[in-house]
Image: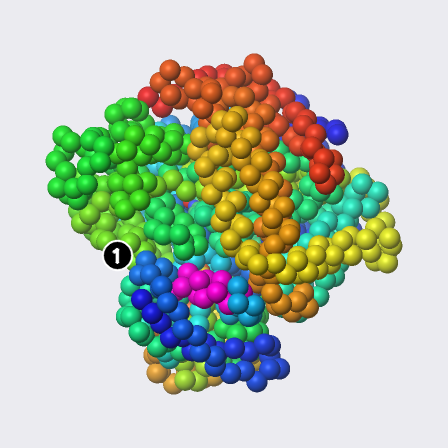
Amino acid sequence: MKLEAKIPSGPLADKWTDYKAHTALVSPANKRKHTILIVGTGLAGGGAAAALGELGYKVKAFCYQDSARRAHSIAAQGGINAAKNYQNDGDTVFRLFYDTIKGGDFRAREANTYRLAEISNEIIDQCVAQGVPFGREYSGYLANRTFGGAQVSRTFYARGETGQQLLLGAYNSLNAQVNAGNVDVFERTEMLDLIVIDGVARGIVVRDMVSGEVSSHFGDAVLLCTGGYSNVFFLSTSAKGCNGSALWRAYKRGAAFANPSFTQIHPTAIPQSGDFQSKLTLMSESLRNDGRVWVPKKAGDDRPPNDIPEDERDYYLERIYPSFGNMVPRDVASRNAKNVCDEGRGIGPTKRGVYLDFAVAIERLGVDVIKDRYGNLFEMYEMINDEDPYETPMMIYPAPHYTMGGLWVDYDLMSNMPGLFVLGEANFSDHGANRLGASALMQGLADGFFVIPNTLGQYIAKGKHPDVDPNCDEVRKVEQDAKDFNQKLLDIKGSKTVDYFHRAMGMIMLDKCGMARSKEGLNEAIEKIGKLKEEFWADVKVPGTGESLNQELEKAGRVADYFDLAILMCLDAREREESCGGHFREEHKTEEGEARRDDENFCHVAVWEWMGEDQAPQAHKEELEFEYVELTQRSYK
Amino acid sequence: MKLTLEIWRQKDANDKGHFETYELDNVRSHMSFLEMLDVLNQELIEKGEEPVAFDHDCREAICGTCGFVINGVAHGHMKRNTVCQLHMRTFNDGDHLVLEPWRAKAFPLVRDLIVDRSAFERIQRAGGYISARTGSAPDANSILIPKEQAEAALDFAECIGCGACVASCPNGAAMLFVGARIAHLGFLPQGQPERVERAKAMVAAMEQEGFGACTNYTSCEATCPKGVSIVGIAKMNKDYFNAKLFSGGNLGGKE
Ligand SMILES: Cc1cc2nc3c(=O)[nH]c(=O)nc-3n(C[C@H](O)[C@H](O)[C@H](O)COP(=O)(O)OP(=O)(O)OC[C@H]3O[C@@H](n4cnc5c(N)ncnc54)[C@H](O)[C@@H]3O)c2cc1C
Ligand code: SF4
Ligand code: FES
């Protein structure tokens, strides 16, 4: 397998400008002749569809929801970063780049991350032009807040609904292109497989989720913008439909999977309340700006939080990390929450929780300011927990949230397979082993609106792209495979529901491949998940048929893929004999219990190649080279 | 607690449809309404019956996918709520709940509690946007927007496109939804150049989709999970009125 990152030469700060100046272009008249298939309509896919439509490409966009505006980007709460330095607090493109690289524990590519930081400013301009009503000062200027892992205030926001507002902006731009006749959107349409002809991505097989009809679409490039796969843990902050299936099926057709085990467990979600729970609800990281995290000093202290006196509380983040305090990066905050709960100091009915306390902030700023900043989050908390966070501290606990891993891409965002591009959370490229808050929205919009319009032309201009014969053997076979896969699931007619299996797998993953991992635990997980997978294929019960709307069948297909993906995640986590970012191996920690990287042996991207059913995948490496930042032990003390 | 659920079952648009009654034990107060339906569906599947189809995704009251009518009220009895964030602790042991899909001419039924809201898509595509070519935007702080104005735009931009307003309107009107979209962009300086055209195009699309007329019942506002105000409807009417004036060649319109 050839892994060529194709990073432009020249100084870091000039790479992207030089790239754009020299990239091959497609003439406006010719763009119309090229069909681009875009799977996903979140910030990455929706942005790409809008921008490529504007350029004149013929775009077909697909999503599984009934509207492009419902992609899970809609749920992002806290904000989006940009190096505008509107606060005059010393922010620069380099600083945003550096914070992101350091936050990712030096496991991301310098050139990609720098480009992201560089584009961040254009994104804010573009969003404001689209009508995104960002938070403002009374003067009418844009307001900012601070997010974890940074000491500058660079996060733009719209109440606690930043993702919704950004996605509506992208969706509106997408709609303008639909109206102009450049983009067709296929809602309630799920990608089942990738069509590869002579090693080149040429189309997708999809299922109409209402009629059940399976059909194919062809194009000169396929863009996967299908988001993250945190639902492999069953309980996560993802929407119920979020899945890894588009990525997994592309992987099985030859696309490489990079760092699959790099997942982010977000420190501030509402704790699980029972075994019927269907998902976890995030409480935005922005809350840590004004909220203080603590647990009782004494294990087993059952008093209500307001009865515990100040000197019997342990504000453990402020204690351990005096310089970043409550604003340490997510991986650090999550791991520490787990540690104090493991010590028996957790709170709430399950004892897996810590307090997030606003009392001091409310006293300092007044209720109105806090309401203005976080009103809707507080409301949401009260709705779910039936407790008023203005009066009683919130209870929070870490939850699976984001997947830094994804399909491998080069600087152009093209996978190792020609014609297959991967954007947004679905690719692996910018966040290394841990993503900083407010940087995923930035990446989605950067990839969709600003990167792909400049890099796709290169591929389109240089290739031939002959028409695909819809009746050729390759197409027929992939269509048949996709139909057979679903039929096989329907034919099992076993005794247990899809959710039963998904929950069971999620529990193993969270326990063994979550916030702390060990060789022993991972081996155990691989074995257990393997057995569960066998049981699934022998005993799952999927009612109904494939020829009509069938939500259980949709779920079954996704869970089937999650089994395989989970095993790959465990393999990847086992191979990486170091701790970095969100990947914490019990065997590799400093004396103080912090992650210990091994730059000598693991300063690389782990890239996996599918070798066939029941075959071990092959491991490859892309060595990471750092020219502009010095690899240091990450410290937030 | 124990519940009796009377749920609308309909295989597809051509099927006639009927209510089916289910008894559910062991409903716990911490469950969300959809989690309660998950439990029912697990039981149905295990018994070899077809689960109840309902739309949902984020389960955080933000994507706008979920929604059905509970005892005659869109999204149920709690104000400013969606069914995914409606919690069972707000119900009583022994409650009898009737669940129906959104019923509106412009929302054909897909299955059980799922309807087809693509009419909303067509309205938004007709002109519900600002044409801002990528890369052409000036610096974000070059146009200042007073905080109150940005907040007002955001109040309308919070609409999640769920369709409850249509379902709760005796006329099946989409005014609150369309008004929200128009008011969001209309409050911003960036939205001014296309304001009048936008209203014209969206209202025309709305009428074409078969949504009813607004006769000021205001039940839409009462059930809207995001508290979208009917002030948006007034703003829409004003923009639309101006559009009519302009297109009629009469230049008497002021804005
Ligand atoms: C609760 C929450 C809060 C967050 N808050 C923040 C924040 O404050 N700041 C920040 O920067 N980031 C935040 N994030 C992360 C960020 O929102 C996401 O990483 C980002 O929006 C992902 O965008 P995307 O375009 O890559 O994917 P998505 O928005 O997830 O879109 C995926 C698209 O792919 C489609 N799709 C998926 N599979 C298929 C298939 N098989 N067939 C057809 N279509 C398919 C879906 O329909 C959808 O349109 C948050 C995430 C969550 C869950
Ligand atoms: S206006 Fe309210 S009820 Fe209507 S679609 Fe929007 S959020 Fe739903
Ligand atoms: S499922 Fe998203 S709003 Fe209810």
* Tally of numbered discs: 1
Quadrant in the picture for the C terminus of chain A: top left
User: Relative to B174, does residue A614 appear above or below in the rendering?
Assistant: above
Q: Residue at x 57, y 41 (%)?
A: A529
Quarter holding ligand 2: bottom left
The colour style of the image is rainbow
- Can residue A562 be seen here? The reply is yes
The x, y position of residue A399, in whole percent, is 41, 42
Magenta region, mostly helix, strand or loop?
helix
Residue A317 found in image quarter: top left
- Can residue B229 be seen here? The reply is no
Local secondary structure at mark 1: loop
Q: Residue at x 36, y 52 (%)?
A: A274
Quadrant in the picture for the N terminus of chain A: top right
Q: Is residue B37 magenta?
A: yes
The x, y position of residue A16, in whole percent, is 61, 32
Give the left or right position of residue A487, taking residue A112 as reference: right
Question: What residue would you read off at disc 1?
Answer: A386
Q: Residue at x 32, y 74 (%)?
A: B95
Give the left or right position of residue B227, taking residue A414 as reference: left
Give the left or right position of residue B245, taking residue B75 as reference: right
The x, y position of residue A584, in whole percent, is 46, 27
Q: Residue at x 23, y 49 (%)?
A: A389
Front residue of this view, candidates A157 and B143: A157
The x, y position of residue A69, in whole percent, is 52, 59
Front residue of this view, candidates B247 and A72: A72
Q: Amino acid at mark 1?
A: Asp
Q: Which residues are magenta?
A: B33-45
Front residue of this view, candidates A399 and A468: A399
